Image (spheres, grey):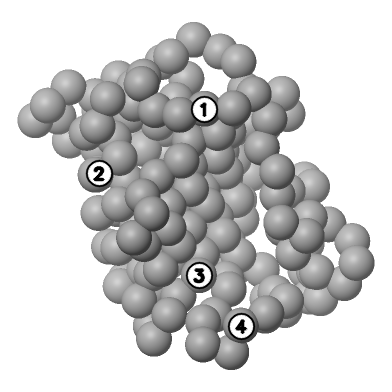
Amino acid sequence: MLKEILGVLQDDPSSQRRWFHDDYFDLFVRETEGELSAFELCYGIGSDERALAWIRGQGFFHDGGISDSEGFIGARLAPGDSLAADPILARFERAAGGLPETLRLALEARLREYALQDAAGAARRARFRRADWQRTGGGQRLQQGPGRNP
């Protein structure tokens, strides 16, 4: 179950950054006026870690390690399938059960949108860069920390 990491560095008074974590996912979100305006969903562990990012008005970017195409979000979905037909998305739906409902619904809508695209053709990089606030150390985690370094 995704748990919120408190004390996330805030850099823009017009929006709020939030960080949720479990043993498989790191979810970084930005909300503006209570609505989802951007997210980065990091999934996998170690060398297989990947990230799906979305920014309102700019769209999606998928960034990940080298693996078969079935290891990416949405790669196993066919038109008309439920999100639960994809193992990564099914795992996210289970993990997201404790998120605030409006945030959870907004994330599920964006994930559905991405997953129903041709995920195999999405732009990918072998490594992704995290923003300073998404790294450990430097006071970014003021309260509790997750079990692995995001």
> Tag 2: Cα neighbours inside 10 Å, few (<14), some, or many (≥20)?
some
Q: Which residue is mark 2?
A: 112
**Comes first in the chain, label 4 or label 2:** 4
Q: Which residue is mark 4?
A: 12
Of marks 3 and 1, the one in the foreground = 1
> From this viewpoint, which residue is outermost toward the bottom?
13
- Under circle 1, the secondary element is loop
**Comes first in the chain, label 2 or label 1:** 2
Question: From mark 1 to mark 4, how far is it between C-alphas?
Answer: 28 Å
- Under circle 4, the secondary element is loop
Numbered badge on residue 143: none
- Asked if residue 48 can be seen in this view, the reply is no
Looking at the picture, which amino acid does disc 2 mark?
Arg
Name the residue at 40% across, 68% down: 37
Numbered badge on residue 30: 3
Looking at the picture, which amino acid does disc 4 mark?
Asp
**Comes first in the chain, label 3 or label 4:** 4
> Tag 1: Cα neighbours inside 10 Å, few (<14), some, or many (≥20)?
some
Figure label count: 4
Q: Which residue is mark 1?
A: 124
Name the residue at 58% across, 73% down: 17
Question: From mark 3 to mark 2, how far is it between C-alphas?
Answer: 19 Å
Question: From mark 2 to mark 1, how far is it between C-alphas?
Answer: 19 Å
Question: From mark 4 to mark 2, how far is it between C-alphas?
Answer: 28 Å
**Comes first in the chain, label 3 or label 1:** 3
- Under circle 3, the secondary element is strand
**Who is closer to the viewer here, 91 or 108?**
108
**Who is closer to the viewer here, 5 or 35?**
35
Q: Are marks 4 and 2 in contact (CB under 8 Å)?
A: no
Of marks 3 and 4, the one in the foreground = 4
Q: Position of residue 81 (x, y in %)?
A: 14, 29
Q: Are marks 1 and 4 in contact (CB under 8 Å)?
A: no
